[in-house]
Amino acid sequence: MAPAQPSLQRIALLIQYLGTRFYGWQRQPNHRSVQEEIETAIASVVGYPVVIHAAGRTDTGVHAAAQVAHFDVMTLIPAHRWADVINARLPDDVLIRASAQVPADWHARFSASWRRYRYTIYTEARPNLFARSLSWHYYHAPLDESKMQQALAPMIGHHHMAAFQRANSSRPHAWVDLQFAECIRQDSFLYIEVQASGFLYGMMRLLVGLLVEVGRGDRSVESFTQLWQNERRHEVRYAAPPQGLCLLRVGYPDMPFPPELWFDAQPKLNLSRMTLEPSL
């Protein structure tokens, strides 16, 4: 009986990473990237270079709870085993949660219907080491989450978002289909979640930076809306810091992974005050 021959497979990966020590997702010279770490791990198994394609490119310092990527490989390794194979060769700030075979025409970026980001703001005055790398510690002024939510509401729909696009973007246009936007408070944390068909370069951090001006009362909801509708990019001066931002999940018509692995894979921080028992 002839031995089994390797076949060309397209493998999808469900990826988590802490962005703190990365210069973003995309491979680049002289800087550490998530893409390079994973490609190097795969190449060490198959013995030749492999390129992986992601659903989105996160910036320096930005995290991901359920990034999706794919690569093509000639292999006898079962698709579901690739997660363990790659994890054995990765550093401790990157994790492959799952792997699966997908059709040859399935693409992590172009098959995606939407992406969802979460931005976390920690509002207690006293710092907390366990919140530091995953949130923006903003305590300089109280933030009114109801006004921030009011400012987000008119953004739902198909809009030109050039006011929230950083310079040097390679995107040919600034139209965005924004499907969901929410700002909620849970104890000491504000969570801003935005879902869209795609995001402009730097969009979430610029959006949050301007939204905080509304929350602290320095800008009205009406002024916020007029600014982005009139594309006054020069008035968007500050981007929120990267450590508060996480690519929460990516949506597909034919998602290759079960929802319990990707739907809400970034645990929310909970530092609610305790009621202590009196000493006996």
Image (cartoon, grey):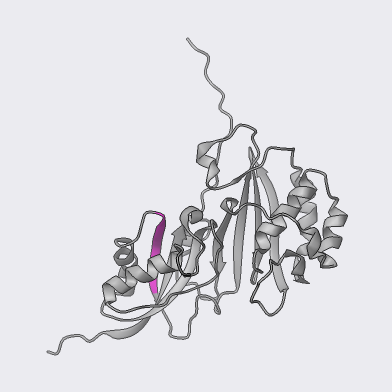
264 lies left or right of 257: right
Q: Position of residue 113 (x, y in %)?
A: 60, 74
Q: Position of residue 215 (x, y in %)?
A: 77, 46
Residue, far left:
1
Closer to the camera in the image, 238 or 14? 238
Q: Is residue 73 above or below residue 232?
A: below
176 lies left or right of 46: right
Residue 79 seen in this snapshot: yes
Quadrant (top left, top right, bottom left, bottom right) of the N terminus: bottom left
Q: Is residue 212 magenta?
A: no
137 lies left or right of 4: right
Q: Position of residue 268 (x, y in %)?
A: 55, 47
Q: Is residue 110 above or below residue 258?
A: below
Residue 80 seen in this snapshot: no
258 lies left or right of 127: left
Residue, far front:
30
The residue drawn where x is 60% and y is 60% is 117
Q: Position of residue 137 (x, y in %)?
A: 62, 42
The answer to which quarter of the image holds residue 160 is bottom right
The residue drawn where x is 30% and y is 86% is 7
Give the magenta-colored segment's residue range. Answer: 93-100
